[in-house]
Amino acid sequence: MFASSRVFANPHICGIQLDVSAKEFAAGKLDTQPFYNTNISQGNFQEVYYSTGSARFSESGEDSENGMLYRQRVTIKFPSNDKYRSQRLEELRKIKFLSVKLSNELKLILGRNDFFQNTAPEINFSSTEKSTQVQFTTYSVFPIGFFENTAAYGFVYEIPISFLEPL
């Protein structure tokens, strides 16, 4: 039983990447949370700048008539006074997935709210003359899983997805 296993890691966020074009699918390796973990196909994750120490991740769950509903949230902060501020905010509104790299070398993937993504993350921001805080929120039918790099196992990304893509 996994609930009784001790967890030894206490990681910190050490990187965040965003993607606007990826296709995701549930991981297929049976020894690594096959439904909860995520594989990415056709993605082009780009590093996002944020102020050191400002990135936060949280997750909460609430019972509903249809089962558990999980809310995952990532918050970042950066200076408001650069000449590309408006353009930066508009680019952030287009994201489909966030990858949160942890200091224990695992990556959280936000954006897959069901077997396939059917709703992009919600983006909210607030600014002062000094800083802008951006909050990415996703709602999901399962708790957050980790990114699995199928290339590390010798698979090409497109092969396992071919039978999973919706019509």
Image (cartoon, helix red, strand yellow):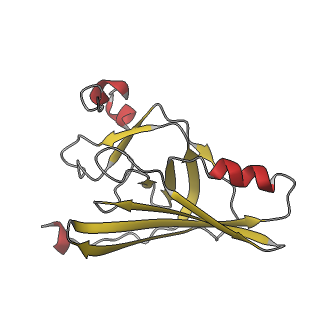
Q: Quadrant of residue 15?
A: bottom right
Judged left or right of residue 13, residue 149 is left
Q: Is residue 36 above or below residue 130?
A: above
Tell me what residue is drawn at x 73 percent, y 65 percent: 78
Q: Is residue 156 visible?
A: no
Residue situated in front as seen by the camera: 27 or 163? 163
Q: Residue at x 42, y 51 (%)?
A: 119
Residue in the foreground of this view, choosing between 145 and 111: 111
Q: Horizontal placement of 90 versus 150: left or right?
A: right
State the count of labels. Answer: 0
Towards the viewer: 18 or 94: 94
Residue 71 visible to an observer of this rendering: yes
109 to 134, vertically: above or below: above
Quadrant in which the N terminus appears? bottom left
Is 64 positioned to the left or the right of 147 in the image? left
Q: Residue at 31% x, 24% y: name it.
A: 159
Q: Position of residue 111 (x, y in %)?
A: 43, 52
Q: Pick the residue in front: 17 or 94.
A: 94
Q: Which image quarter holds the C terminus?
A: top left
**Side (left or right) of 75 relative to 145:** right
- Give the residue displayed 34% in from the left and 71% down from the top: 8
Q: Is residue 19 above or below residue 66?
A: above
Q: Most extreme residue toward the left, as rendered? A: 1
x, y (%) of residue 132?
73, 68
- Residue 29: give x, y in percent of width and height: 23, 42
Picture quarter containing residue 63? bottom left
